[in-house]
Image: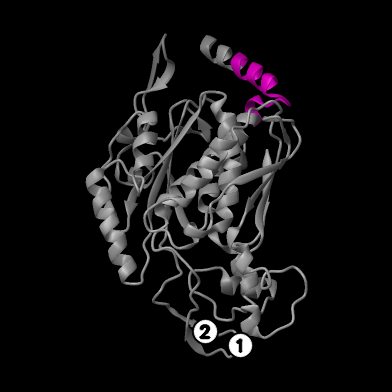
């Protein structure tokens, strides 16, 4: 499978095309939009989330509730477009820089300056409109479709926040269904209620100071069979592909799998997962420090992936920058922003990881229809059971 997205943060819509989804996969439209709405929640979000009420329209590739095997076309409308129709119109526009809302003061931490230099754009709005994290709405919609494919095979996806700024949540292990329920009820998507209150207070403090904070989020996927991905080439290792996808999320600056960087301070005897065998469970691991991967392939244990999100760079107490016209120093222009988007980032993480797992699943078991994929999957499980 593959997908492309298009659209700007203040344009009429975001568009995504998914190619390679098997036919006869049931699409639950309500569930698709629930995932988009989850992305908009979370304590610390800005005014944009009060404007947009995201819902995906499927305009191709699905008929009578099932995929047809053709490319799936998704559209997420931008409700704020009505205020930007003249400024973001595709037709030529005459007018002053002020009327055109031209941006000539790049903001530190954004793509503004790099993109302007690379694409030779003197209006940095042409960069920020596309580099905006608004694009993650399309990526969540795409991941939500992939998630429904995984659900056909009993694969479940969950996410949680582990840290916001200076506040770290205690690790509380829960069954995945319980984890989904508890985090969905939390405004900051944490299990630890004591940390939840501290996180909310921390966000309020930082917002009052005109600043922003980042954090650490985690995705867990259960029910994945052994053998997705491959060790034979660097670019076929599924953990590597997931790491690339995670760091591609706006404002994400790092990824770890399993115990990740913690392994650097431990001995091998404390890190590697011992192999066990029982007739009931077959081959399995005594622990899951590797986060569900060995040699770039899934082990059958839960996939555990974490990503670190930097503080959002748009601040209400702007940092110094340089005007690209005059080359004089100014404070950076402020665009609408959130004080903290870590809870929303947790939802985005779930969906980019789900997409990569779904792609690897179809590479392993893929057929043109769901029925063919299911036959391949069941035959493989029988092969593994007989090993």
Secondary structure category for the residue under label 1: loop
Q: Position of residue 22 (x, y in %)?
A: 70, 29
Report the disc number at residue 325: 1
Magenta stretch: helix, strand or loop mostly: helix
Residue at figure coordinates x 74%, y 31% from the top left: 69
Residue 322, percent from left and from top: 52, 84
Q: Is residue 131 magenta?
A: no
Query: Would residue 366 be visible to someone looking at this image?
Result: yes
357 displayed left or right of 17? left
Q: Visible in this render: residue 237?
A: no
Residue drawn at (51%, 48%) of the image: 246
> Residue 358 appears at what percent x and percent y?
59, 34
On the image, the x and y values in percent for residue 160 come to 38, 43
Question: Is 301 on the left-hand or right-hand side of 148?
Answer: left
The residue labelled by disc 2 is 322
Q: Which residue range is magenta in the image?
A: 363-379
Q: Quadrant of the N terminus?
A: top right
* Dot 1 alpha-carbon crowd within 10 angstroms: few under 14, some 14 to 19, many 20 or more: few
Decide: is 380 above or below 178.
above
Pointer 2 and pointer 1: residues touching (CB < 8 Å)? no
| Vertical order, 267 against 370 (above or below) | below
């Amino acid at each position: 499978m593959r997908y492309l997205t298009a659209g700007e943060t203040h344009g009429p819509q975001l568009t995504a095309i998914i190619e390679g989804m098997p036919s006869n996969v049931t699409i639950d439209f309500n569930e698709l939009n629930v995932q988009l709405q989850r992305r908009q929640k979370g304590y610390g979000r800005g005014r944009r989330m009060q404007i947009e009420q995201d819902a995906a329209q499927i305009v191709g590739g699905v008929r009578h509730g099932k995929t047809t095997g053709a490319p799936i076309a998704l559209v997420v409308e931008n409700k704020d477009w009505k205020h930007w129709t003249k400024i973001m119109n595709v037709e030529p526009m005459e007018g002053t820089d002020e009327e055109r809302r031209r941006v000539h003061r790049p903001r530190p931490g954004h793509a503004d300056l790099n993109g302007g230099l690379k694409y030779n754009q003197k209006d940095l709005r042409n960069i920020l409109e596309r580099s905006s994290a608004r694009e993650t709405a399309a990526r969540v919609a795409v991941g939500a479709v992939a998630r429904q494919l995984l659900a056909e095979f009993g694969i479940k996806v969950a996410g949680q926040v582990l840290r916001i700024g200076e506040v770290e949540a205690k690790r509380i292990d829960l069954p995945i269904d319980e984890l989904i329920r508890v985090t969905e009820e939390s405004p900051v998507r944490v299990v630890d209620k004591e940390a939840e209150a501290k996180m909310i207070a921390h966000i309020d403090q930082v917002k009052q100071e005109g600043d922003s904070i980042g954090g650490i989020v985690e995705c867990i996927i259960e029910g994945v069979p052994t053998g997705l991905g491959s060790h034979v080439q660097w670019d076929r290792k599924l953990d590597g592909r997931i790491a690339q996808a995670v760091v591609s999320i706006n404002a994400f600056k790092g990824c770890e799998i399993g115990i990740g960087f913690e392994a650097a301070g431990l001995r091998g005897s404390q890190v590697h997962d011992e192999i066990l065998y029982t007739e009931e469970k077959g081959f399995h691991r005594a622990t899951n420090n590797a986060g569900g991967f060995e040699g770039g392939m899934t082990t059958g244990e839960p996939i555990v992936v974490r990503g670190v999100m930097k503080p959002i760079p748009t601040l209400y107490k702007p940092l110094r920058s340089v005007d690209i016209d005059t080359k004089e120093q100014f404070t950076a222009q402020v665009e609408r922003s959130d004080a903290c988007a870590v809870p929303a980032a947790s939802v985005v993480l779930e969906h980019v990881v789900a997409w990569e797992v779904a792609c690897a699943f179809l590479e392993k078991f893929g057929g043109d229809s769901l029925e063919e994929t299911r036959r391949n999957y069941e035959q493989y499980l029988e092969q593994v059971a007989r090993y």
